[in-house]
Image (cartoon, rainbow, N blue to C red):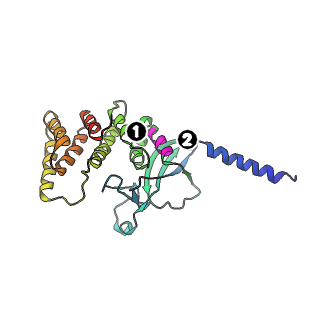
Amino acid sequence: MRHQPQVIAAIVLSSASSIGAQTLQQQVATSNGVVQIVYSSRPNACGDGQSYIRNVLGHSETYSGDFNGSVRNGWLGRACVHGPARLVLTVINGEVTRARVYVGPVPAVGTDTHSITVTANEAAAWMSEIIARGNTRAASDMVFPFIVADGSEPWPLLLKVARDDNRPRDLRRNALTWLANGVSEHLGLLDAGDQTDDDEMRTQAVYVLSQRPKSESIPQLIELARSAKHASARRSAIFWLGQTGDPRAVDVYAELLGVR
């Protein structure tokens, strides 16, 4: 009996080593309930850890699924903290059915939440598999958390998904929307919130153009996306080109991003 403490310690260490050796995919696949994955976010990204995320693409702001827009929540007064990212999953019998991402302070979790900390590359690799092959809801939910990860640029994967007719239409549209944002950021065109009246008129004119028949609108949107002189018109053309769902938009985005 004198060796019992050492035996118990060895068993505990062996168990911990086994858990640590599991891949992220394996840990999620053997879960049931709420799973929280913590990983490094893009350097400029910040948030309050509960409702909003800022600066993922320039001046853009995104809200989590928990945000209800009420000022009484006090979200306006909460500091925008840089990283980490926190991906909260609903997992049923090993399958991800819902995903929400937050950036900022990580709150304490209850015993009903399985918390996993991984590198950004590990998180991105796992999310990329779901985006490329997972079910519609989970794949679409993973696009923004994938973009948030502090790793390699997400555009090659999103271009691939947008070109894949075998992937769900909603997922491809989601990929196109984020690709449009990526193009605008890459070209330095994101809206800084200081548009003039002329800028607003140009933006509206491009929107009206986008509502015309595709045979007329798409060639003009492509031309404006490539070479419009005014940033507001070019940014608007890049966005509305993606919203058409036309496959030519993907090639234009790849060209402007310098990715193939």
- The kind of secondary structure the magenta stretch mainly shows is helix
Looking at the picture, does residue 79 appear above or below residue 169?
A: below
Nearer to me, 260 or 138:
260
Q: Position of residue 183 (x, y in %)?
A: 28, 45
Nearer to me, 51 or 144:
144
What residue is disc 2 on? 29
Q: Which residues are magenta?
A: 121-128
What residue is disc 1 on? 136
Dot 2 alpha-carbon crowd within 10 angstroms: few under 14, some 14 to 19, many 20 or more: some
Left or right: where 35 falls relative to 140: right
- Residue closest to the far top: 166
Taking the spot 27% from the left edge, 34% from the top edge, the residue there is 251
Of the numbered discs 1 and 2, the one sitting upstream in the chain is 2
Nearer to me, 70 or 161:
161
Image quadrant containing the C terminus: top left
Looking at the picture, does residue 115 appear above or below residue 253?
A: below
SS at mark 1 in the image:
helix
Q: Position of residue 36 (x, y in %)?
A: 52, 52
Taking the spot 53% from the left edge, 50% from the top edge, the residue there is 35
Quadrant of the rendered image containing residue 136: top left
